[in-house]
Image (spheres, helix red, strand yellow):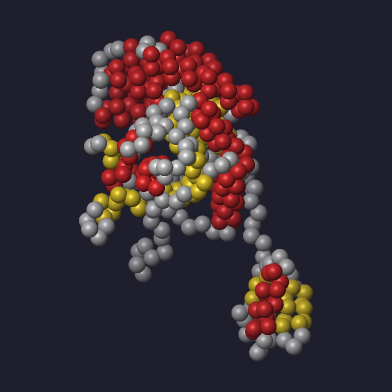
Amino acid sequence: MKKNLRNTPDGTRDLLFEECIARREAESTLSDLFLQRGFSEVMTPGMEFYDLFEGGGHPVLPVENMYKLTDGKGRLLVMRPDSTMPIARLTAARLKNAPLPLRLYYMQDVYHLNHGMTGRNDQEFQAGIEVIGAAGERADLEVISLAAESLRRCGVENFRIEIGHVGFFHSLMEELAVDEDTRDEIRTTIETKNYAALGGLLDGLPASEAAAAIRRLPRLFGGEEVLEAAAPLCRGEQTRKSLEYLAQLYKKLCGLGLGDAVMIDLGLVHRNEYYTGVIFRGYVEGSGDTVISGGRYDTLLSRFGMDLPATGFGVNVDALTKVLLDGGRVDPPMPPEILVHAQKGYETAALQKVNELCGEGILCEFSVFETLEQAQAYAEKRCISQVFSVGREIDVYEI
């Protein structure tokens, strides 16, 4: 037998029964919510040209995390690693004359190599929204509050949304004057709150106020007290503006009743290079995965010849459905109420009876067995309560 005949590729898995029900329920709930809030659905191809994610010699997404392949002409493609970039492309190609702001939503898989990280899927089903052509606090407030509402609509109450601002980190990093590789290493250690690794990197750099401030970033996490602790680190205009904006946004989110769910995290940085302002992530009790990720990306559309501000978020539907399943919030699939068996020569009549019962909203199944005894034995195993035997008349058997 071939070694991988019964296995799925690393980072992928099959879904069965309750998992499928939970996934579909989450999809339906989120789709209904987004439609109610004025968003229209779009879909992008599962494969895109690598050029889409390559930004002027420096990839907008980590190149080592992309699945790559070539087309029939030898051109480099990637399996869609992100939905925001393709939607930006779609907007410039198909929606450049549409009224602004554009309110778009999507339901589709993304693919990213996790390089053997235990428990992480390389194929992830995401649902998300993009608001294109809207700048400022009002759009940020709507998007973050809608992210929270997405979790609530799916029946999740114990969640946390962490908000940060990339301007704070970028401003401090500009003062360090390090190369791109070192910058990425520092970003990764801050994001993972790896204090020891961050300290080692900064110890190798000349001592400076910026390095001292960056060393503190992973610990600047909490409520309003974080803003007070961070104020002395604001030596430049950009850091001050970022902190002031976060303070305003946090206050208004608290006014929406999200005070217990929203936290400020100045150590929140993102490896996707296109973010320019507020960024946020959502976590759910019982899951170690990031369930929501989003933020503002005001310069991304300019790559496509459209100078438009934008913001949005994506929901990791796979992680969300696992939480719903683990919490017992999803019922197993119900067996049919009736098994319709055809006596010899009455197959057409039996199938017509199946259609009739289904039209009345009754769960039923057509028997593929030759004998009534086989059909009854099957019905017992499947916990089907009745067997209809269709001939000149219909005989009903209770199981």
- Place of residue 40 in the rendered image (x, y in percent of width and height, measured from the top left): 52, 46
Find residue 8 and report its image quarter. bottom left
The residue closer to the viewer here, 33 or 80, is 33
Q: Residue at x 56, y 56 (%)?
A: 20
Q: Is residue 143 left or right of residue 197?
A: right
Residue 358 in view, yes or no? yes
Q: Is residue 61 above or below residue 197?
A: below
Q: Is residue 55 above or below residue 318?
A: above
Residue 138, how many percent across, how many down?
53, 27
The C terminus appears in which quarter of the rendering? bottom right
What residue occupies the far bottom of the structure in this picture? 345
Q: Position of residue 274 (x, y in %)?
A: 36, 34
User: Which quadrant is the N terminus positioned in?
Assistant: bottom left
Q: Residue at x 70, y 77 (%)?
A: 353
Against 319, residue 145 (above or below) is above
User: Does 227 sit left or right of 338 as displayed?
Assistant: left
Which residue corresponds to the image point at 45% horizontal and 14% vertical from the top-left?
230
Q: Is residue 365 left or right of residue 87?
A: right
Residue 86 in view of the camera: no
Tell me where residue 79 appears, x and y as whole percent. 35, 51
